[in-house]
Amino acid sequence: MAATKYIFVTGGVTSSLGKGIISSSLAKLLQARGYSVTIQKLDPYINVDPGTLNPYEHGECYVTDDGAETDLDLGHYERFLGVPTSQSNNVTTGRIYQSVINKERKGDYLGKTVQVIPHITDEIKRRILLLGKKHSYDFVITEIGGTVGDIESLPYIETVRQLRWELGEKNSLVIHLTLVPYLAASGELKTKPTQHSVKNLLENGVQPDILILRTERTLNKDIRKKVALFCNVDLPSVIESIDVTTIYEVPLLMQKEKLDETALKKLNLPISNPPKLTPWKNFVDKLKNPSKDVSIALVGKYVELVDSYKSIIESLTHAGALNSAKIVLHCIHSETINEGNVDKILSGHTGIIVAPGFGDRGIEGKILAVKYARENKIPYLGICLGMQCAVIEYARNILGLKDAHSTEMTRTTNNPVIDLMEEQKGVTEKGGTMRLGAYPCDVKKSSLVFKAYGEEHIRERHRHRYEFNNEYLKEFESAGFLASGVNPDSKLVEIMEMKNHPWFVGVQFHPEYRSSVLKPHPLFVSFVEAALLKKESN
């Protein structure tokens, strides 16, 4: 295949229809046919990246190998494709305008008036095309965030219009995802919102090639014909996306609806190689037909919005399927945990995860959850702040350092077992200033985590400012709390585990960012195994 083909995915009617899942599903089908594919997210908000956004506002902030703080949809892309993304895969309006303004300040536009068209749209085009040229992908799928009709999305839709003209019909494709709501009162599926959504697109000069209709009820042929007629697409290009029990069924559903075949035909490409999806089907089968279950408590402070912990939840799903187990997950707000109720809240769970986070809100509840897991020999996984809470709890209750804390929470503590990294002490800006991206870690062969990984040298992704204070390392290790993973360059402690406990591990990095459907993360797999053993022993 010579030229890179560009597929644009837009959304209408309402947000949160699943453009990221549809994009990932189509990418998976094309990948399973032997094509190289990447997916890009264009976000209309003016923040430079989601790194400074409250998780309640935007869900999880996903981190790539090269240290980009990105939209959580990039997590879906990686989990489905098993291919790392990068800074280039997530573009925001803030980044676009920042780049254009910087060029204007340097005089790159030679005194011209800088406008949305052509300067902003040219910069968006450059970012889209760069991804294809840089890595020679067969397909670049670009998901346009937001909903058609939003003011914020207009420059992106205009960019799609221009690119369609520049690339030609056989090198580009527009897929529009909309909702067909069911009105219970009249017992009807209504296509009018889809018609209006497509009309909105047409007003901006973009004709969709394929329509994907989200629905909770099966679409009959008459409804499909009506949509095809009123929205000016051929009948095979009206595709049903009915609600399913797991997002991992969507590629199989899209294959059944022939989304990949339709796309390839429209791009004048052969459809001779059927997609090889046997491992994926096996995963979905194990996910839907578990032979056992295990109860896991996820203790965090953003639990009202489950998207705040999206990658952790999906990593547990992957590990559960590999262990033929259903994960019965209970998200527990750390602010609700106190000395009087910790036993009542956490009893019955055979695995406890303390989630990442920032700030002191709910911190004591997290520390109590750590203590409960330690004392009751419950398998424990502490991620980032979850590791730091384990360190604080151990220092207070085993080492006898009663005021031990992190300087993030208490700057005046006499025992800063968790402290700010030296290079962070002069930093005042928040955005993109943490230890971000993939760093090496050497794992001790005698450790529990070595059994999980099966290798001594690993790379994991980070997103934090505070670290274990090495001044206390000897004291911890002499009391049975071991540094089993260390950064070979900085000597920073990356993994700590507890002796005389069935499974107790704290990691400074975020293992959830590296788990995918066909390659579940070994730490989550080992943690779920330990939780199942705990359940059996009970």
Image: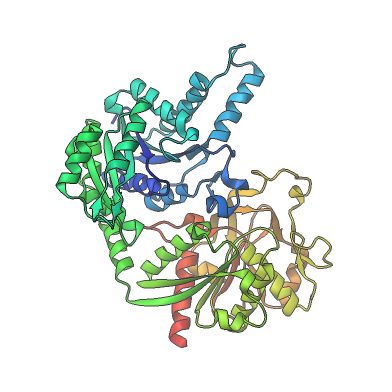
Residue drawn where x is 43% and y is 85% of the image: 536
Q: How is the image coloured?
A: rainbow
| Residue sticking out furthest to the bottom | 538
Give the side of residue 316 with respect to residue 405, left or right.
Answer: left
Q: For this rendering, which residue is in front, 23 or 209?
A: 209
What percent of the width, then of the height, locates residue 117?
49, 20
What percent of the width, then of the height, locates residue 277?
26, 54
Relative to 153, say whether 455 is above or below.
Answer: below
Visible in this render: residue 482? no
Q: Quadrant of residue 393?
A: bottom right
Q: Quadrant of the N terminus?
A: top left
| Residue sticking out furthest to the top | 111
Q: For this rendering, which residue is in front, 95 or 5?
A: 95
Relative to 232, say whether 338 is above or below.
Answer: below
Q: Quadrant of residue 327?
A: bottom left
Number of disc labels: 0
What percent of the width, then of the height, locates residue 433?
67, 45
What percent of the width, then of the height, locates residue 449?
54, 68
Residue drawn where x is 67% and y is 68% of the image: 389
Q: Quadrant of residue 30?
A: top left
Relative to 490, say whether 453 is above or below.
Answer: below
Give the side of residue 31 with respect to residue 271, left or right.
Answer: right
| Residue sticking out furthest to the front | 185
Visible in this render: residue 318? yes
Q: For this rendering, which residue is in front, 260 or 179?
A: 179
Q: For this rendering, which residue is in front, 147 or 389?
A: 147
